[in-house]
Amino acid sequence: MGFQKDQSAGYLTNHLARLFAHRLHDAIAPIGLAPAQFMTLIELWNDDGLTQAQLVERLDVEQATLANTLKRMERDGLIERSPHPSDGRSQIICLTEKARFLEVPATSAAREISEDALMRLRPADRQSLIRLMQQLLDTMREEKKPARDA
């Protein structure tokens, strides 16, 4: 029997992520944000003043990908960089007032998209789905880590 996409967690997750990303793009583009900027801003709204390395780890993206996103965000006036106080090779990335102002409309749009997607699920099923997705993320992150010597 061949590959059954409707029974593949990876296929379904990827397809769902693309649909969410398209909806998010459409919702936040009018306020001047792209999905990659939004996910970076979420981390900074929760914990402003992170380094690029910390963002790479939290977002599970390649360093070069994040570097390009940060360059655009700096150009667009969403972040400012300053030297790290104890690591001369690193910079601290901080939100600007413009970025702080965008938190409510951007997160409201994302929340609405999630609510729309989950509206046919009972509250208990919503909670179960979120919990299971978090478990999958933890599993995938653990598998990504290099093996350690015993």
Image (spheres, helix red, strand yellow):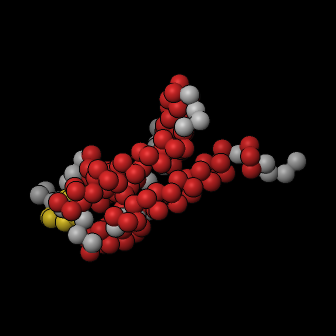
**How far across and down, in percent of the image, does residue 71 sit?**
30, 72
- The answer to whether 82 appears left or right of 13 in the picture is left
In the rendered structure, the answer to whether residue 136 lies left or right of residue 91 reads: right
Q: Nearer the viewer, residue 83 or 18?
A: 18
Which image quadrant is residue 91 in?
A: bottom left
Q: Residue at x 40, y 69 (%)?
A: 64
For image coordinates 42% across by 50% down, the residue present is 110
Q: Position of residue 139 (x, y in %)?
A: 53, 39
From the viewer's side, name the closer residue of 149 and 102.
Answer: 102
Residue 36 vs residue 121, the one in the foreground? 121
Number of labels in the image equals 0
Side of 10 where 106 appears, left or right: left
Residue furthest to the right in view is 1
Pinpoint residue 144: horizontal percent, then vertical percent.
Answer: 51, 49
**Farthest-out residue, top:** 124
Q: Is residue 75 visible?
A: yes
Residue beneath the point at 74% across and 46% down: 6
Please name whichever residue, 13 or 23, is drawn nearer the observer in this view of the structure: 23
**Quarter holding residue 56:** bottom left
The residue sitting at the left extreme is 85
Left or right of 83: which side holds 126? right
Q: Quadrant of residue 121?
A: top right
- Rendering coords of residue 134 (x, y %): 49, 37
Residue 79 vertical placement versus 19 (above, below): below
Q: Is residue 51 visible?
A: no
Q: Residue at x 66, y 44 (%)?
A: 9
